[in-house]
Image (cartoon, helix red, strand yellow):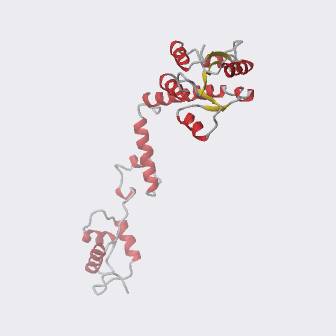
Amino acid sequence: MTVEGRVGGGGKDKFPVGMRVLAVDDDPTCLKVLENLLRRCDYHVTTTGQAATALRMLRENKDQFDLVISDVHMPDMDGFKLLELVGLEMDLPVIMLSANGETQTVMKGITHGACDYLLKPVRLEQLKTIWQHVIRRNTKNRGSDNDDAGQKGPNAEGENGGANRNKRQSRRDRDDNGDDGDDSDENSNDNGDSSSQKKPRVVWSVELHRKFVAAVNQLGIDKAVPKKILDLMNVENITRENVASHLQEVPAVSEKDEYGCK
């Protein structure tokens, strides 16, 4: 039975009770002590004194173990090598166990993929919580599966997801430009009066202002109305409202002062 089944099931064997641990240590005394402590935690324990044997058992009995706890220094195979092979061939949490607590050795175990590094003599309190590594690994794997499904599966927004994103992007663009109108307003004004649509902002350059002044002087200040000025200027992308606004902002102009300055 898998970890998921034992965690979620309503049977008598409730995880972490019965968690299947493979313990590896070439020292018979240390291995026996470790086995007894693990059994006191209500784990199901399998032991071996050789790393090579442990690897064979794992290969031949896939899905039969939840966690491996191994000594670091063993004659037939280094514990780090076992850790490396387990990491490459199967997805099991591995805890390293050693009397060597030097930082370099501990770091080697962690960098090789060990989920924990315990110093001998190991204590019962430490072994009572090692089941968390199984849950953590299982949760991580489920998260990875969900991520893959999300990438390969259909768009959560449906067939119109792309169109909806484009609409939202267009709305954000309008907001950035200071336009508070919505899509319905734009559609309703497609065939309407151009004066009701939002006009592009006009920048009154020196050249544009010169044309404005020339039109005003040609008409005369008394007859210079926005529509006539616009006709004489003959400039694209400029409206009667633009001319009227500029006419109010600019003081009386003459041929002698084409920039409208006094």
| Nearer to the camera, 179 or 17 | 17
**x and y, in percent, of residue 120 in the image:** 68, 30
- Residue 46 occupies which quadrant of the picture? top right
**x and y, in percent, of residue 247 in the image:** 37, 75
Q: Residue at x 44, y 31 (%)?
A: 151
- Residue 51 occupies which quadrant of the picture? top right
The answer to whether 112 is drawn above or below residue 68 in the figure is: below
Q: Residue at x 47, y 27 (%)?
A: 149
Q: Residue at x 70, y 26 (%)?
A: 127
18 lies left or right of 88: right
Q: Residue at x 45, y 48 (%)?
A: 171
Q: Quadrant of the C terminus?
A: bottom left
Q: Quadrant of the N terminus?
A: top right
**x and y, in percent, of residue 91 in the image:** 53, 24
| Nearer to the camera, 158 or 209 | 158
72 lies left or right of 232: right
| Nearer to the camera, 42 or 189 | 42
